[in-house]
Image (cartoon, grey):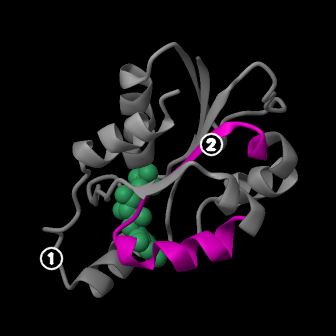
């Protein structure tokens, strides 16, 4: 099995999840940070593709959205998984509808939220202010679930 994980992360939470998946998945696994990737991403040769993004005010990174929109056919042929890092997993259906083509959502074998982290020390003042206003300073629910990541891997296994 050859897997490609394409992700976008602002403060590193999604990146760490992508790295966790890579460390646990069977076979060869490649990571691509779409915000750092200048070359075109080649999907050929991969049987499994994972798309991972974090959610900011209802949206995942623009480059990730554009990639999914532009590669709908290529992605739909794969064993496809989509994951999110987000503080409000209960809004996942709205996030999916606002960010990904319906065909891609339908093609996915698994779609899961892994939870979230609030990396306040790294955050811009602006982001911290927004997050603080929304959470009222309570970050107790901001956690990543290893169980969710393990379930995700299991669901994609051939
Ligand atoms: C300014 C800001 C806005 C956010 N907006 C949302 C949101 O709309 N929905 C949500 O579920 N989580 C939201 N979050 C939580 C992030 O998705 C979460 O912290 C995630 O783990 C960040 O991952 P990253 O470090 O990979 O970017 C927001 C966080 C910040 C700082």
x and y percentages locating residue 107 in the rendered image: 69, 53
The mark nearer the N terminus, 1 or 2, is: 2
x and y percentages locating residue 113 in the rendered image: 40, 58
Seen from the viewer's position, the closer of residues 118 and 111 is 111
The answer to whether 69 appears left or right of 153 in the picture is right
The answer to whether 136 appears left or right of 94 in the picture is left
Residue found at x 44% / y 78%: 91
x and y percentages locating residue 41 in the rendered image: 79, 32
The residue where tag 2 is placed is 80
| Magenta-drawn stretch contains 33 | no
* Gap between marks 1 and 2 measured at Cα: 34 Å
CA neighbours of label 2 inside 10 A, class few (<14), some (14 to 19), many (20+): many
Based on the displayed image, in which of its 4 quarters is residue 118 positioned?
bottom left
Seen from the viewer's position, the closer of residues 76 and 52 is 76
Based on the displayed image, in which of its 4 quarters is residue 4 positioned?
top right
Residue 69 seen in render: yes
Seen from the viewer's position, the closer of residues 105 and 53 is 105
The residue where tag 1 is placed is 138
In the rendered image, the quadrant that contains the N terminus is top right
Q: Callout 2: helix, strand or loop?
A: strand
Q: Callout 1: helix, strand or loop?
A: loop
Q: Compared to 60, does 155 lie above or below?
A: above
Ligand 1: which quarter? bottom left
Residue found at x 57% / y 48%: 109
Contact (Cβ within 8 Å) of mark 1 with mark 2: no
| Magenta-drawn stretch contains 85 | yes
The answer to whether 67 appears left or right of 139 in the picture is right
- Please name which of the two marks, 1 or 2, marks the residue nearer to the observer: 2
User: What's drawn in magenta, residue-wise?
Assistant: 75-101
Based on the displayed image, in which of its 4 quarters is residue 35 positioned?
top right
Residue found at x 32% / y 58%: 116
Residue found at x 23% / y 63%: 142
């Amino acid at each position: 099995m050859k897997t490609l994980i394409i992700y976008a992360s602002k403060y590193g939470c999604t990146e760490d999840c992508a790295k966790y998946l890579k460390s646990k998945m069977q076979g060869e696994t490649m990571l691509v940070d779409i915000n750092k990737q200048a070359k075109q991403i080649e999907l050929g040769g991969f049987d499994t593709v994972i798309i991972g993004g974090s959610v900011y005010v209802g949206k995942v990174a623009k480059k990730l959205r554009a990639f999914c929109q532009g590669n709908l056919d290529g992605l739909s042929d794969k064993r496809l998984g989509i994951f999110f890092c987000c503080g409000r997993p209960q809004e996942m259906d709205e996030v999916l509808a606002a960010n990904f083509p319906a065909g891609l959502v339908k093609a996915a074998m698994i779609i899961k939220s892994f939870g979230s982290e609030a990396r306040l020390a790294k955050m811009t003042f602006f982001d911290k202010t927004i997050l603080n206003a929304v959470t009222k300073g309570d970050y107790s629910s901001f956690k990543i679930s290893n169980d969710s990541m393990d379930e995700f891997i299991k669901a994609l296994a051939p």
